[in-house]
Amino acid sequence: MSFYEVIKEYPYDYVKDLIYNADENKIKNALYKERLTAKDLAYLLSPKAEIYLEEMAEISHNITCQRFGKTIRIYAPIYLSNYCTNSCIYCGFNRKNSIPRVALTLDEIRKEAEIVASHGIKNVILVTGDNMKKFSFDMLMQSVKLCAEYFPLVSIEVPSLTFKQYEELHNAGADGLTMFQETYIESLYPSFHPAGPKSDYLYRLDTPERAAAAGMRFIGLGALLGLADYRIDTFYMCLHAEYLSKKYWRSLISSSFPRIRHAAGEYKPEYNVTDRNLLQLIFAYRIFLHDAGVNISTREPASLRDKLVYLGATIMSAGSKTEPGGYSAAQDDAAQFSIEDNRSVEEFCSTIKKLGFDPVFKDWDNSMQGINFAK
Ligand code: SF4
């Protein structure tokens, strides 16, 4: 069964009804279940469940500590190119925005990698816009190989690719993929993605699955909160994470909860997602999926990120720059979105420690490779 078939089992109006007509008994019942159904998830995402936010926070904290310990994995993005052929109406890299366009050379990428590595970072995600003429697949392969010299874990957040391309990238050293669906609501998707390769809803929806099937061990999902009804989008994202966790159990599935931030262009989101709304979505996800990661980037302000260290985050970026070449020379008007937490890696890690958690830069090794246990 494909994930698209799963979505079809939960039509939009049905999910909306579950979320907006949940009653208190159903919510209370869902809160203390060992394993939640999709309906229970909808109840925890409902506006009525907001009155249980404190209870949800406590349960979320307990589950996270039980499954992940008091640890936060640290990573940083490296933006390689902001050329893009797509027209996502909410994004600063949209092809229609007149921003300085940059595609880094291998020498420039090495410079970025050296700076990021000098802060102790061992886990990076390489980000590009969607323009394979300006930043080719071959260049991406070379970038992955280059960064693998500096970082034990290299992930990618790049255009949707084929299974074979993911296999090649995986063999070159890429072990993770992030692919945000932006909105799972098929009828709304075209209005946000009017042109370019990304306008293909189904191809994008299947992308995380192609990467997991190709062997990527870390798969990141996300809906861009604020584009559409964020409660409904989070419902579908949770089902997506559950589907992938069951089918590709060797991969760790994590989800991000990005709220739309200011970027170049005029786009104003239709839905305002408050801090309380965001916390409720994260808690519901955690109570539904005990073993999935929660990724909180520097899009969120320092005060909220500090709370989330305690309340459910498992992976957090630090010291990030969101423009190509940003670590060597800042050029803010070329950024994909604005950063809210500008603390350095060192400052952020010191805060994590003060909160009683351990920042983790590396928690795996390749040392088992090549050992033949059959001997
Ligand atoms: S969201 Fe991605 S694909 Fe869309 S315009 Fe921005 S960089 Fe391009």
Image (tube, rainbow, N blue to C red):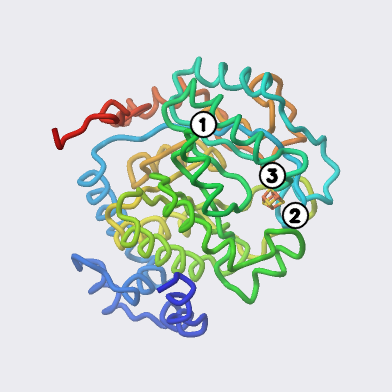
Q: Which residue is mark 1?
A: 76
The 10 Å Cα crowd at callout 1, few under 14, some 14 to 19, many 20 or more, is: many
**Helix, strand or loop for disc 1:** strand
CB contact under 8 Å: marks 2 and 3: yes
Amino acid type, label 1: Ala
**Helix, strand or loop for disc 2:** loop
N-terminal-most mark, 2 or 3: 2
Q: CA distance from mark 1 to mark 2?
A: 24 Å
* Identity of the residue drawn at 25% across and 67% down: 31
Using the image, tell me which numbered label, if any, was put on residue 86.
2
**Residue 368 sits in quarter:** top left
Q: CA distance from mark 2 to mark 3?
A: 8 Å
What x and y, as percent, mark residue 77?
A: 55, 34
Q: Nearer the viewer, residue 216 or 100?
A: 216
Q: Nearer the viewer, residue 233 or 221?
A: 221
The 10 Å Cα crowd at callout 2, few under 14, some 14 to 19, many 20 or more, is: many
Amino acid type, label 2: Asn
Q: Is the residue indicated by label 3 positioned so its CB lies within 8 Å of ligand 1?
A: yes
Q: Is the residue indicated by label 2 positioned so its CB lies within 8 Å of ligand 1?
A: yes
Q: Nearer the viewer, mark 1 or mark 3?
A: 3
Count of picture labels? 3
Q: Nearer the viewer, residue 127 or 343?
A: 127
CB contact under 8 Å: marks 1 and 2: no
